């Protein structure tokens, strides 16, 4: 691999391995500290991108199939292919850097084709809007009961921020 590729691989290791491990160790060492909880929340935001990207792409697939379009494959991430196979009637590819994804869909250009395609595209960001609202309400409920500095509150805030980022990027 080129030097740039090796640097990207190191960056992925730092982001997906070292940040969560460091955050977890610091949180275990200082569970009552707000900064260790915030660092753990940041690590959770980073790690949440992976399953949230899968849910995002599956939202496109479910809506496409519901509207009579054909979903062919889902690719998660970019870079070198790590895993590939078939599941749920789709071809799946998981790449080295699991940031972002692509769902390949098609269908016959019949009546309302553009509307069906537009609704399919909207499904991913709509999912994040719903999940962000649920995380926000959980976070507020925890804060109102005095549990704003608990691990559950950090998870709820991490899910809120992760979904908001993916909502904005997905539009």
Image (cartoon, rainbow, N blue to C red):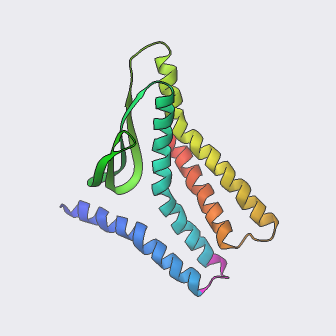
Work out which residue is located at the far front of the displayed protein and give it: 88
- Is residue 34 within the magenta segment? yes
Q: Residue at x 57, y 87 (%)?
A: 29
**Which residue occupies the extreme bottom position in the image?**
29
89 in relation to 131, above or below:
above
37 falls in the magenta region: no
Q: Tell whether 4 sits left or right of 117.
A: left
| Residue 35 image position (x, y, % from top left) | 62, 77
* Residue 136 position by quadrant: bottom right
Position of residue 51 in the picture relative to residue 158 (left or right): left
User: In this orientation, which residue lies closer to the viewer: 115 or 10?
Assistant: 115
Q: Residue at x 32, y 54 (%)?
A: 95
Q: Picture coordinates of residue 30 (x, y %)?
A: 61, 85
Give percent across and percent down for residue 58. Answer: 47, 42
Q: Main secondary structure of the magenta part?
A: loop
In the depicted structure, whether residue 84 falls above or below residue 139:
above
Q: Residue at x 39, y 41 (%)?
A: 102
Q: Specify start and end residues of the magenta stretch as a single range.
A: 30-35
């Amino acid at each position: 691999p080129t030097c740039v590729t090796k640097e990207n691989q190191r960056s992925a290791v730092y982001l997906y391995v070292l940040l969560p491990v460091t955050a977890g160790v610091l949180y275990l060492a200082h569970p009552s500290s707000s900064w260790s909880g915030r660092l753990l929340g940041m690590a959770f935001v980073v790690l949440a991108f992976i399953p949230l990207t899968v849910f995002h792409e599956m939202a496109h697939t479910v809506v496409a199939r519901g509207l009579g379009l054909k979903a062919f494959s889902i690719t998660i991430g970019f870079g070198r292919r790590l895993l590939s196979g078939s599941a749920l009637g789709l071809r799946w590819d998981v790449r080295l850097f699991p940031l972002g994804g692509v769902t390949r869909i098609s269908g016959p250009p019949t009546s309302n084709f553009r509307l069906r395609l537009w609704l399919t595209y909207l499904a991913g960001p709509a999912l994040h809007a719903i999940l962000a609202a649920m995380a926000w309400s959980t976070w507020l409920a925890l804060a109102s009961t005095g549990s704003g500095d608990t691990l559950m509150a950090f998870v709820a805030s991490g899910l809120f921020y992760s979904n908001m980022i993916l909502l904005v990027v997905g539009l």
